Image (cartoon, grey):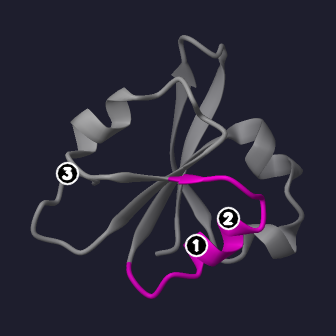
C-alpha cells in the first residue's frame, strides 16, 4: 500500500516518536505533525496521504478534526504497547 515509489503520496506521523523505521520501510520522508490542527490539514491534502497515529489519539479527536480520514490498517506497537493505525484521505 505505501511502498509505491512512482506515486505521489505523503506519509505523516502524529505523536509517534518511537517509529524511526517508518522512513526505511516506506522509503520516503515522513512528515512529523506537531499540532493537533495539523492532522485535518494533512488529511485534506489533494494528494493521497497516509497518517500513522495511535488508535487512542484518533478516537479521541473530535470528528471535525479527523476530517475525511479512514482507517486502512492497524497494528500493535511493540515499544509503545498500544495500537497504531494508518489513516488515509482516500
14 sits left or right of 86 in the view: right
The residue that mark 3 highlights is 3
The residue that mark 2 highlights is 39
Q: Are marks 2 and 1 in contact (CB under 8 Å)?
A: yes
Element on which disc 1 rests: helix
| Numbered circle sitting on residue 35 | none
Work out whether 41 lies above or below 15. below
Residue in the image at 37% along x and 65% along y: 10
Element on which disc 3 rests: loop
Q: CA distance from mark 3 to mark 2?
A: 22 Å
Residue in the image at 62% along x and 69% along y: 69
Residue stretch rendered in magenta on the structure: 32-47
- Residue 77 position within the rendered picture, expressed as x and y whole percent measured from the top left: 55, 20
Residue in the image at 67% along x and 53% along y: 34
75 sits left or right of 59 in the view: left
Crowd tier of the residue under label 2, counting other residues whose Cα lies within 10 Å: few below 14, some 14–19, many 20 or above:
many
- Residue 86 position within the rendered picture, expressed as x and y whole percent measured from the top left: 51, 49
Work out whether 55 lies above or below 47. above
Along the line of sight, the residue nearer the viewer: 30 or 74: 30
Q: CA distance from mark 2 to mark 1?
A: 6 Å
Along the line of sight, the residue nearer the viewer: 21 or 64: 21
Amino acid at each position: 500500500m505505501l511502498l509505491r515509489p512512482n506515486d505521489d503520496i505523503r506519509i505523516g506521523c502524529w505523536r509517534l516518536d518511537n517509529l524511526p523505521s517508518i522512513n526505511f520501510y516506506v522509503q520516503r520522508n515522513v512528515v512529523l505533525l506537531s499540532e493537533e490542527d495539523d492532522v485535518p490539514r494533512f488529511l485534506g491534502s489533494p494528494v493521497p496521504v497516509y497518517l500513522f497515529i495511535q488508535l487512542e489519539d484518533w478516537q479521541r479527536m473530535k470528528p471535525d478534526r479527523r476530517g475525511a480520514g479512514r482507517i486502512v490498517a492497524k497494528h500493535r506497537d511493540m515499544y509503545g504497547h498500544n495500537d497504531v493505525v494508518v489513516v488515509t484521505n482516500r
